[in-house]
Image (cartoon, rainbow, N blue to C red):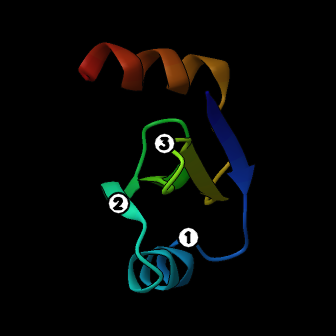
Amino acid sequence: MALHVHVADVDALAKRAEAAGAEILQQPTDMFHGDRTFMAKDPEGHVWVFLTHLEDVSEEELLKRMAEQ
């Protein structure tokens, strides 16, 4: 199972999660869809994806960015 959660500050949360023993699967990264995300796995094996919204991206811009990936 993977859970997506929007938070105010993914960078601060990533630091706290790592200090608490979470396995960081992806360090905080700006993503093409306009969010900054990081992924972590908790001790029970659940994967968490945390996001902070950075910008609104139009459908046209989103498709352009996806094509560039």
Residue 16 seen from this side: yes
Question: Which residue does the image show at 65% across and 19% down from the upper left?
Answer: 59
Distance (Cα) linking label 2 and label 1 = 15 Å
Mark 2 vs mark 3, CA separation in Å: 9 Å
Q: Left or right of 22: which side holds 27?
A: left
Percent from the top left, x then y, of residue 50? 60, 55
Badge 2 vs badge 1, beta-carbon distance below 8 Å: no
Q: In the rendered view, would you say 5 is above or below 9? A: above
Horizontal and vertical percent position of residue 53? 67, 57
Q: Secondary structure at mark 1?
A: helix
Q: Earlier in the sequence, mark 2 or mark 1?
A: 1
* The one of 32 and 19 positioned closer to us in this rendering: 19
Q: In terms of sequence position, does the residue under pointer 2 or pointer 3 come before the other?
A: 2
- Please give the label number shown on residue 23: 2
| Closer mark to the observer between disc 2 and disc 3 | 3
**Is the residue marked by circle 2 packed among few (<14), some (14-19), or many (20+) residues within 10 Å?**
some
Q: Secondary structure at mark 2?
A: strand
Q: Could you say whether the residue bearing mark 3 is in a helix, strand or loop?
A: loop
Residue at image location 43% in from the left, 83% down from the top: 15
Residue that carries the numbered disc 3 in the rendered image: 45
- Say few, some or many: other residues with alpha carbon within 10 Å of mark 1 (under 14 / 14 to 19 / 20 or more): many
The residue closer to the viewer here, 25 or 69, is: 25
Q: Looking at numbered disc 2 in the image, what kind of residue is underneath it?
A: Glu
| Residue drawn at point x = 40 percent, y = 75 percent | 21
In this rendering, the answer to whether 7 lies above or below 17 is above
Q: Nearer the viewer, residue 11 or 35?
A: 11
The mark lying in front, picked from 2 and 1, is 2
Residue 64 x, y percent position in the rendering: 41, 19
Q: Which residue is mark 1?
A: 10
